[in-house]
Image: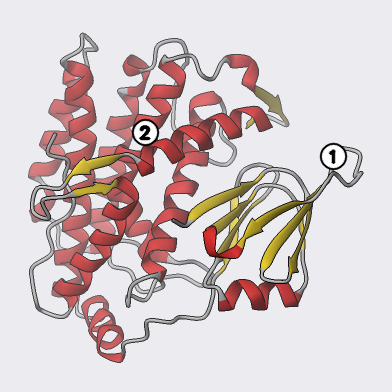
């Protein structure tokens, strides 16, 4: 079974016959013993350290359909190497474009993405509200915002509504998380530990969605809620909205409330909060466990992982675009 590999050390990656050879470096730049990764076991690579590689390696990765996602020193997502599309479908491309261009069709999907995201946020809040964490004021506010969803007729208005919902949702973090302060949501730069984890986790969720879109016939640059922009895969942003409460936020609650991460796992540098390498590894491990956890799917009648749920969401979106079946966003039912 293919899996994701996370490269925290700087190092050199090369092809060794039909295997990946990664030679990591220590903090002084001295090479450490190489590690070998069978290419058939790799679904994608996440690079948090500097990666030294040549075009021969990327040709090998491209032919093996392995994506590489890059993050900078401050945990910002900086870009991806995506192999050549292998599931080309002109009809899907045309219909996906038409659903973006035609305002009525786009608004339908944009509303559904917000509806799915808000539902999953409320699910999180109700879970903790039933466990003596009083977040009822935030639940009430989000429900009021949701009543306004069908009154808006412009995508920009929907984005504003989504921002209000998420701001209200993040206010509840102050109550849910035991020993850390959330404060205001700050991204550039994140001002404290919780904001740093949200930014880091959201980028991982975005990369996960991008990787799953690649294995479908959808075009990752044509989106419906977010505006398509140069140099970004905006459809992954749309899908990530639905899954962030389920995959990212619940992971944050777990690692902080179970004290898997402590205050000394972070440091303040130039007015920004930065996760230390050990903190990144702890969070990545918890995130991997989360996305590989399985649930019994109600309609498929079999166990599927959270990671596979993202791909199923892509299939549902494809069916909607082709007029086969109306899209229903993923909503947790447990």
Q: Nearer the viewer, residue 94 or 49?
A: 49
Of callouts 2 and 1, which one flags the residue occurring earlier in the amino acid sequence?
A: 1
- For the residue pair 212 and 94, the one nearer the viewer reads as 212
Residue corresponding to mark 1? 26
Marks 2 & 1, CB-CB < 8 Å contact: no
Q: Residues within 10 Å of mark 1 (few under 14, many from 20)?
A: few
Marker disc for residue 243? none
User: Helix, strand, or loop for circle 2?
Assistant: helix
Q: In the displayed structure, does residue 66 sit left or right of residue 181? A: right
Residue 186 visible in the displayed image: no
Q: Quadrant of residue 70?
A: bottom right
Q: Which residue is mark 2?
A: 249
- Label 2 environment density (alpha carbons within 10 Å; few <14, some 14–19, many ≥20): some
Residue 89 position in % (x across, y down)? 31, 87
Q: What is the secondary structure assignment of the residue under circle 1?
A: loop
Q: Is residue 131 above or below residue 14?
A: above
Residue 95 picture location, percent across and down: 22, 84
Query: In screen coordinates, is 162 left or right of 297?
Result: right
> On screen, 33 above or below 157?
above
Q: Residue at x 17, y 57 (%)?
A: 111
Give 166 or 312, whichever is nearer the viewer: 312
Q: Nearer the viewer, residue 54 or 200?
A: 54
Vertical arrangement, residue 122 with respect to residue 108, above or below? above
Callout in the foreground (2, 1): 1
Q: Position of residue 242 (x, y in %)?
A: 27, 49
Image-based side of 174 in relation to 200, left or right: left
Res 189 seen here:
yes
Quarter of the image that includes the C terminus: top left
């Amino acid at each position: 079974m293919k899996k994701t590999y996370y490269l925290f050390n700087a190092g050199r990656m090369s092809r060794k016959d039909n295997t990946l050879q990664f030679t990591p470096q220590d903090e002084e730049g001295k090479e450490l013993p190489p590690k070998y990764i069978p290419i058939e076991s790799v679904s994608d690579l996440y690079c948090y350290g500097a990666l030294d590689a040549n075009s021969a390696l990327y040709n090998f990765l491209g032919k093996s359909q392995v994506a590489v996602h890059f993050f900078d020193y401050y945990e910002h997502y900086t870009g991806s190497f995506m192999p050549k599309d292998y599931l080309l479908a002109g009809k899907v491309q045309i219909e996906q474009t038409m659903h973006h261009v035609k305002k009525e069709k786009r608004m339908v999907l944009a509303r559904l993405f917000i509806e799915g995201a808000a539902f999953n946020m409320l699910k999180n809040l109700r879970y903790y509200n039933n466990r003596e964490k009083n977040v009822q004021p935030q639940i009430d506010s989000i429900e009021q915002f949701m009543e306004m969803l069908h009154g808006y007729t412009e995508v920009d208005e929907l984005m504003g509504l989504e921002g209000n919902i998420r701001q209200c949702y993040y206010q509840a973090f102050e109550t849910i998380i035991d020993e850390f302060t959330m404060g205001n949501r700050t991204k550039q730069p994140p001002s404290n530990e919780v904001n740093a984890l949200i930014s880091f986790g959201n980028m991982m969720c975005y990369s996960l969605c991008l990787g799953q879109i690649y294995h479908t016939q959808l075009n990752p640059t044509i989106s419906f809620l977010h505006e398509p922009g140069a140099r970004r895969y905006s459809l992954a942003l749309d899908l990530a909205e639905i899954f962030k409460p389920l995959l990212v936020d619940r992971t944050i609650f777990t690692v902080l409330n179970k004290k898997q991460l402590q205050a000394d796992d972070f440091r303040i540098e130039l007015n920004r909060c930065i996760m230390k390498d050990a903190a990144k590894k702890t969070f990545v491990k918890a995130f991997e466990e989360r996305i590989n956890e399985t649930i019994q799917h109600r309609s498929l009648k079999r166990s599927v992982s959270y990671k596979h749920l993202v791909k199923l969401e892509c299939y549902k979106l494809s069916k909607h675009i082709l007029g086969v079946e109306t899209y229903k966003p993923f909503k947790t039912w447990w």
